[in-house]
Image (tube, rainbow, N blue to C red):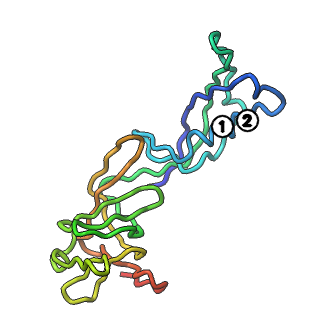
Amino acid sequence: MFYVKTLEHEIELEPIHFGQKLRATIVRLLKEEVEGLALANYGFVVNVIEVPEEQIRSGIIEYDTGNVVFYVKYTALLLRPFINEVVDATVAQCNELGFFAYVGPLRIFVSKHSMPEDMFNGFDGERDSWVSDDKEVVISSGCGVRLKIKGRTVEQGNITAIGTIKDNYLGLIDDGSGETDII
C-alpha cells in the first residue's frame, strides 16, 4: 500500500525565480506539482520526503522563452493499491448499487454483488445505508469497513479501485460511533 521510491521530475522556472533561494524555490514547486498526483505506474504521491541537493541537475535554457528546465530526482512516499490487498476504509457514500469508501485519496467502490448474501437486498433509502437481514450490520456514511481490493483503474490522473466485503473477516469494523469492534 505505502512505499518509498526515488522518482524524477522536470521543473520549469522563469528567470524571476533565480537568486539565492533557487534551491528552495525548486523544492517548493516540486512539492506543489507532484504531491497528490496519481502516477500510472507508481500510485499517488503522498509526500515528497527528500530532495538531495546533488540530485538537482544544472538547468537547460529554453531559448524561445528564457525559462530554465531543471531535472530533479526526489524520494517520495507513494500510495499504491495492490490486487487482493486488504485495507481499512471509511465509507463516504451509500446508494442502491453499493457504497464508496476512501483510503486516503484512493476511492474504492463496493458493489452490492460484492457484499454478503444477507445484505444483497438490504439498501435502506431513508437512512442511505446497507443493512443485513438480521439488522446486526449497518453500513452507512462515516463507518469503517475492512475490504479487499479486487481491481483498480487509472483514468485522468486518478486511481480508483473496486472492492469486496464478501469474504471472511471483511465488513463493518467501526460503526462511526467511536467504539471499534475488532473482528
Residue 9 position, x and y percent, is 56, 31
The reply, left or right, for residue 163 in relation to residue 68 is left
Give SS at disc 1. Answer: helix
Could you say where residue 103 lies in the image, as x and y percent from the top left? 43, 62
Q: Residue at x 62, y 30 (%)?
A: 72
Question: Residue 106: x and y, percent?
Answer: 42, 56
Q: Nearer the viewer, residue 117 or 98?
A: 98
Q: Is residue 124 above or below residue 22?
A: below
Image point 46% across, 56% down: which residue? Answer: 105
Q: Are discs 1 and 2 less than 8 Å apart at CB? A: yes
Amino acid of disc 2: Thr
- Number of callouts: 2
Quadrant for the N terminus in the image: bottom left
- Which residue appears farthest toward the top when viewing the image? 63
Left-right relation of 58 to 79: right
The quarter in which the C terminus is drawn is: bottom left
Q: Residues within 10 Å of mark 1 (few under 14, many from 20)?
A: some
Residue 141 picture quarter: bottom left
Secondary structure type for disc 2: helix
Q: Identify the residue under disc 2.
A: 25
Q: Is residue 75 left or right of residue 2?
A: right
The answer for how far apart the CA atoms under marks 1 and 2 are is 6 Å
For residue 128, above or below residue 79: below
Residue at horizontal 44%, vertical 46%?
A: 43
Residue 25 vs 1, above or below: the answer is above
Q: Amino acid at mark 1?
A: Leu
Residue pointed to by mark 1: 29
Q: Nearer the viewer, residue 86 or 151?
A: 151
